[in-house]
Amino acid sequence: MTPWSSENLSSRAFVDPYAVLPQDSAWGAAAQSRDDVDALLPPPDPAHRIGYTLDPRDQRRLALHATLTAAGVPPMPEDRAAIDQISALPDDVNDVLQRWLHHTS
């Protein structure tokens, strides 16, 4: 086997590996027509929304997660039991906790 040498390239034709003729393209006309790809979806119809409301305890739990995360203290998995206990407290207690957390951030 002879080693390759770049000293005498004049005898070899240059081939551009990125040159592709349009008729050789595997994509065809589908890739060029983007009318259906960029179409926006219609806005959602409020009549078709799922009519489901969260339990107040779940709303407080999610609000507490969001407030802790916004305050820079994202809850860890081991904090779940404590968050569940705090979210079981009445609304006015949770409101005070929310204000305290917003005040410290």
Image: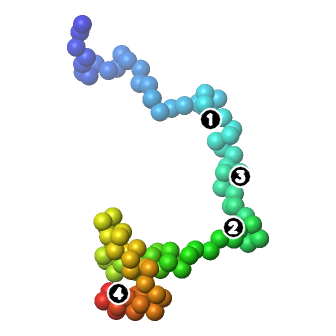
Question: Given contact means CB atoms under 8 Å apart, are the residues at marks 1 and 2 in contact?
Answer: no
Quadrant hosting residue 83: bottom left
Mark 1, Cα crowd under 10 Å, few <14 / some 14-19 / many 20+, is few
* Separation of marks 2 and 4 at Cα, in angstroms: 32 Å
State the quadrant of the N terminus.
top left
What colour scheme has been applied to the protein in the rendered image? rainbow
Q: CA distance from mark 1 to mark 2?
A: 41 Å
Quadrant containing the C terminus is bottom left
Q: Secondary structure at mark 4?
A: helix
Q: Amino acid at mark 1?
A: Trp
Which structural element holds mark 2? loop
Decide: is 37 above or below 17.
below
State how far apart marks 3 and 4 are (Cα): 49 Å
Q: Are marks 3 and 2 in contact (CB under 8 Å)?
A: no
Secondary structure, mark 1, is loop
Q: Callout 3: few (<14), some (14-19), or many (20+) C-alpha neighbours within 10 Å?
A: few
Give the label, 1 or 2, closer to the camera. Answer: 2
Residue type (three-letter) at the residue carrying disc 2:
Ile
Residue placed at 66% from the left, 44% from the top?
32
Q: CA distance from mark 1 to mark 4?
A: 55 Å
Residue 96 badge:
none
Question: How far from the left and from the top, in percent, is residue 21?
Answer: 59, 30
The dot on residue 27 is 1
- According to the picture, the residue beneath numbered tag 2 turns out to be 50
Which residue position holds label 3? 35
Q: Which mark is residue 101?
A: 4
In depth, the one of 52 and 13 nearer the eye is: 52
